[in-house]
Image (cartoon, rainbow, N blue to C red):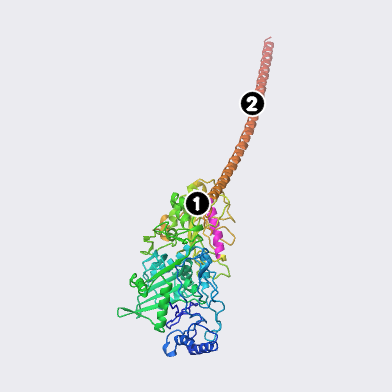
């Protein structure tokens, strides 16, 4: 089959008022079309003797030659590099692969590839980037007289490696659907489809939002362009999420989008194919995106032909050959599954693991999509059944349903996230807490920090998970940015023993910038200060409350005279302790702020059972030793008190004996004095008697 295609290459997108014919990194201005075509004629004339392109050079020029009169209001076309249009024999995707999945994909030479060369194909994501494309290449082409660079297909893969975690790629696609709420979207549906052509499985992500017109479809396929960066309350901002996420989940994606038309524009529907398999297998050196556009006229859908019908037919043939669909009628049936508007994304040729199994597990749960490999821990799965309040902590790494249920802090009213035919129930992690407390954190900005809103703050709600009484190793902070979960169960306090266990928190930090994969934050001074405060908040909370769930009491010394207050630049200078626990959060307060409807692991993820038991045994020994030390200290205190008591008794006894002795001496002296007085009185009586008798004589 002839796979020659009208090139649509992905550049950094530059919005224009003109109708976009193609996406080409080397696009020139309209005024340079004739000059460039004549330049290409001279180039091919000089090289016509040695060039064997498989077709007449003049016919290629006739096809690409766009005159000024016919390209008014359209973007100029630049011819592709040497060898780009050479026909490539079709490749049967159902061929049996060698034992090494990264070995030869096709024995047939491709455009720009020597007959001895091989075009490799790999079904494992982390090895699929070993692709160099055609050697050499024609770099003599200019763009309007300017030097330029090109976007190699390998960039699609290297760009997608920003997603270390496959579920993070799903989150990007769900973000796009949630942003469509502003255009009337009421649901996003994620499902598994069967590829009837190849007999394998595919991913479907569809929404009933406003859809994309042909121009926006090209913006979506472009690298780095995002209209959302100019809009408030939207998650996307880098213009990279669609490409990185789809290429992280599978090698190829086809997009169907229907736009209802507004502001006097007719309704349109567009099809775009971004196929890494196509680009690799044909040896392309630029990212080529075949696209088809239709416009509704008088209740009928008509083709939007941008240059010629032959180019249209080549786009159709290429999309049919490299997509899961067998005809243009099959392609158009996809629009019949929509209503007036919406977008339907189908990702196919899904990546496999080292064992030849799909990286995504569709069989473990008929209403879930799960991950295989290191993200899946059977011990955690069993614990999740035993400790339901810790379920999301234990399962979010491998279960899409679990992860999506906590992905957004708030879900728009009446908006549904449907996963394999069943609604995802939104879950607020605060509902898993007990003894919750609220802290207001106000970030501090340095002189070199750009501040959008100096009044920004974060309400941190933390507490013990309701399963904490079982001493389950669950802890960490769920940090959201503009309603989207960026750091799930961020474990920032890594104590040697059991300290910090069971404490979880939730906050929305809009003053820190997320990384491009939205699975972390950019390392800035503001983030570092936030991390320091969160650690100290957790330490204070743990030290104050750990005894309530069965741990031995802890002591936490205040820093710099810390007292309970809000964290702010005025009363919490650099280096001081964090914001204290201001008030006990009530359910009424938090229901209004958070409506109800890595290092974030649990310490055993990725370990086998024996290592886990050894770790638990070590921790139990540490706890036993700590308790033994406390008992010894208490015994020493009791012994010291006993000794003090004995000393006091001896002192009291001695004092009592001394007083008794003194009392006895006083009695004796008193008795002696009484006797002396009695004797003196007797003597006085005798003297008086003797005097009286003498007077009588």
In this rendering, is residue 637 above or below 566?
A: above
User: Does the magenta run of residues contain 460?
Assistant: no
Q: Quadrant location of residue 196? A: bottom left
Foreground tag (1 vs 2):
1
In this rendering, is residue 603 above or below 668?
A: below
Name the element at disc 1: loop
Name the element at disc 2: helix
The residue at the far top in this view is 697
Residue 26 at x, y percent in the picture: 51, 81
Residue 98 at x, y percent in the picture: 51, 65
Sort mark 2 into few (<14), some (14-19) or many (20+) by Cα contacts within 10 Å. few
User: Does the magenta run of residues contain 531?
Assistant: yes
Q: Quadrant of the C terminus?
A: top right
User: What secondary structure is the stretch in magenta mostly built from?
Assistant: helix
Residue 181 seen in the figure: yes
Residue 49 at x, y percent in the picture: 54, 87
Which span is picked out in magenta? 526-542
Left or right relative to 670: residue 2: left
- The residue identified by callout 2 is 660
- Tell which of 690 and 680 is nearer to you: 680
Give the numbered dot on residue 342: none
Mark 1 or mark 2, earlier in chain: 1
Left or right relative to 251: residue 695: right
Residue 569 seen in the figure: no
Give the numbered dot on residue 502: 1
């Amino acid at each position: 089959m002839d796979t020659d295609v009208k090139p649509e290459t992905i550049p950094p997108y530059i919005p224009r008022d003109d109708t976009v014919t193609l996406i080409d990194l080397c696009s020139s201005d309209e005024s340079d079309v004739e000059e460039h075509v004549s330049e290409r004629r001279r180039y091919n004339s000089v090289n016509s003797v040695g060039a064997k392109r498989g077709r007449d050079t003049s016919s290629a020029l006739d096809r690409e030659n766009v005159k000024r009169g016919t390209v008014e209001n359209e973007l100029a076309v630049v011819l592709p590099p040497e060898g780009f249009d050479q026909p490539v024999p079709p490749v049967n995707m159902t061929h049996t692969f060698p034992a090494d999945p990264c070995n030869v994909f096709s024995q047939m030479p491709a455009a720009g590839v020597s007959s001895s060369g091989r075009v490799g194909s790999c079904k494992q994501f982390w090895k699929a980037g070993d692709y160099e494309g055609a050697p050499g290449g024609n770099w003599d082409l200019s763009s309007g007289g300017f030097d330029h660079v090109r976007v190699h297909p390998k960039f699609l893969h290297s760009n997608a490696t920003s997603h270390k975690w496959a579920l993070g790629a799903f989150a990007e696609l769900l973000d796009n659907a949630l942003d469509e709420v502003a255009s009337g979207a009421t649901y996003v549906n994620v499902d598994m489809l069967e590829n009837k052509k190849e007999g394998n499985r595919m991913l479907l992500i569809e929404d009933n939002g406003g859809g994309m017109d042909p121009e926006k479809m090209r913006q979506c396929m472009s690298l780095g362009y995002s209209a959302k960066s100019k809009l408030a309350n939207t998650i996307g901002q880098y213009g990279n999420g669609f490409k990185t996420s789809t290429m992280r989940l599978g090698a190829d994606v086809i997009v169907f989008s229907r736009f209802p038309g507004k502001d006097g524009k007719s309704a349109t529907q567009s099809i775009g194919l971004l196929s890494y398999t196509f680009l690799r297998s044909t040896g392309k050196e630029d990212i080529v995106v075949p696209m088809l556009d239709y416009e509704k006229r008088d209740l009928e859908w008509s083709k939007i032909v941008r240059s010629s019908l032959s180019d249209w037919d080549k786009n159709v043939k290429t999309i049919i050959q490299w997509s899961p669909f067998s005809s243009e009628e099959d392609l158009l049936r996809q629009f019949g599954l929509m209503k007036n508007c919406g977008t339907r994304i189908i990702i196919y040729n899904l990546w496999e693991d080292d064992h030849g199994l799909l990286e995504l597990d569709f069989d473990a749960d008929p209403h879930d999509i799960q991950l295989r490999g290191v993200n899946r821990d059977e011990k955690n799965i069993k614990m999740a059944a035993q400790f339901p309040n810790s379920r999301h902590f234990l399962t979010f790494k491998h279960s899409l349903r679990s992860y999506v249920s906590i992905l957004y802090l708030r879900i728009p009213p009446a908006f549904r996230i449907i996963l394999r035919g069943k609604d995802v129930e939104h879950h607020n992690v605060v509902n898993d807490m007990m003894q919750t407390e609220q802290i207001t954190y106000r970030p501090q900005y340095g002189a070199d920090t750009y501040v959008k809103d100096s009044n920004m703050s974060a309400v941190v709600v933390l507490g013990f998970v309701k399963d904490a009484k079982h001493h389950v190793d669950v802890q960490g902070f769920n940090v959201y940015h503009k309603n989207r979960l960026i750091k799930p169960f961020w474990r920032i306090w890594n104590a040697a023993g059991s300290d910090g266990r069971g404490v979880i928190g939730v906050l929305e930090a809009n003053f820190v910038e997320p990384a491009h994969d939205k699975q972390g934050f950019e390392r800035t001074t503001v983030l570092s200060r936030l991390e320091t405060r969160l650690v100290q908040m957790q330490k204070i909370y743990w030290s104050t409350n750990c005894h309530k769930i069965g741990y031995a009491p802890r002591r936490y010394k205040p820093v710099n005279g810390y007292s309970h207050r809000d964290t702010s630049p005025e009363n919490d200078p650099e280096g001081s302790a964090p914001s204290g626990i201001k008030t006990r959060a009530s359910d009424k307060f938090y229901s209004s702020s958070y409506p109800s409807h890595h290092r974030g692991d649990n310490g055993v993820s990725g370990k086998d059972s024996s290592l886990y038991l050894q770790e638990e045994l070590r921790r139990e020994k540490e706890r036993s030793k700590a308790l033994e030390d406390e008992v010894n200290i208490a015994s020493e205190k009791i012994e010291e008190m006993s000794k003090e008591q004995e000393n006091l008794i001896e002192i009291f006894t001695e004092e009592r004996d001394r007083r008794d002795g003194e009392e006895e001496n006083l009695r004796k002296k008193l008795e002696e004095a009484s006797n002396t007085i009695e004797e003196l009185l007797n003597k006085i009586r005798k003297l008086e008697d003797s005097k009286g008798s003498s007077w009588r004589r």
